Image (cartoon, rainbow, N blue to C red):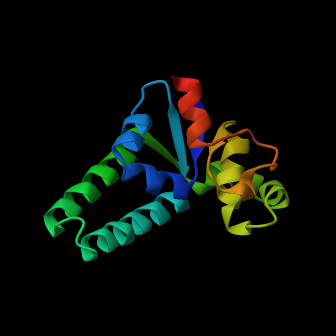
């Protein structure tokens, strides 16, 4: 199954054991827009810092979690450069008017073609198939 991963899903799932197991399934082909990869890396660092600051992880455990998450992105998720999907920008922006910052995810889904793995309602009804984590788990199991 080919899926473009929404940044919010990626960040949330990479910090969960279940999510890492799901991302590492061999029958999932996962893709990420170049800009979204940078955003995911930033958000992961921010989220891990918050967890450490709350005392839920030691700084060493937090660093380890971050390294595992970033390594999973590099190893399992194909990052696609902007020129590959940029020609779909106008169409993607029309399809996702509530959050124009998400145009790259939609454009990449159109270019590949692939579905979008998301929990963000802005993507629902954009004309691309969407999968929530729950429906993805049901399909796989």
Q: Residue 10's spot in the image, x, y percent? A: 48, 52
Q: Examine the rendered structure and indicate whether residue 135 appears above or below residue 101.
A: above
Considering every residue shown, the one lying at the far bottom of the view is 53
Q: Does residue 47 appear to the left or right of 94 in the view shown? A: left
Seen at 30% across and 48% down, the residue is 71
Q: Does residue 45 appear to the left or right of 108 in the view shown? A: left
Give 33 or 15, whichever is nearer the viewer: 15
Q: Examine the rendered structure and indicate whether residue 37 appears above or below residue 84.
A: below
Seen at 76% across and 52% down, the residue is 88
Give 122 or 3, whichever is nearer the viewer: 122
Q: Examine the rendered structure and indicate whether residue 129 appears above or below residue 50.
A: above
Give 141 or 80, whichever is nearer the viewer: 141
Q: Residue 104's spot in the image, x, y percent? A: 66, 57
Seen at 62% across and 52% down, the residue is 119
Seen at 63% across and 48% down, the residue is 84
Q: Residue 115's spot in the image, x, y percent? A: 67, 38
Q: Does residue 60 appear to the left or right of 122 in the view shown? A: left
Is residue 104 visible in this depiction of the protein? Answer: yes
Q: How many numbered markers are drawn?
A: 0
Give 55 or 27, whichever is nearer the viewer: 55
Q: Residue 30's spot in the image, x, y percent? A: 51, 38
Q: Quadrant of residue 64?
A: bottom left
Location of the N terminus (image quadrant): top right
Q: Quadrant of residue 72?
A: top left
Is residue 87 visible in this depiction of the protein? Answer: no
């Amino acid at each position: 199954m080919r899926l473009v991963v929404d940044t919010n899903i990626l960040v949330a799932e990479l910090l969960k054991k279940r999510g890492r197991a799901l991302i590492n399934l061999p029958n999932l082909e996962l893709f990420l827009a170049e800009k979204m990869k940078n955003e995911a890396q930033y958000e992961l660092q921010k989220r891990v810092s918050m967890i450490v600051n709350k005392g839920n992880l030691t700084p060493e455990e937090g660093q380890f979690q971050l390294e595992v998450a970033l390594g999973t992105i590099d190893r399992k998720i194909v990052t696609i450069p902007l020129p590959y999907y940029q020609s779909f920008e106008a169409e993607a922006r029309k399809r996702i008017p509530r959050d124009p910052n998400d145009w790259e995810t939609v454009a990449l889904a159109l270019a590949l073609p692939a579905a979008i793995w998301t929990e963000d309602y802005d993507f629902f009804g954009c004309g691309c198939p969407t999968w929530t984590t729950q429906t993805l788990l049901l399909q796989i199991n």
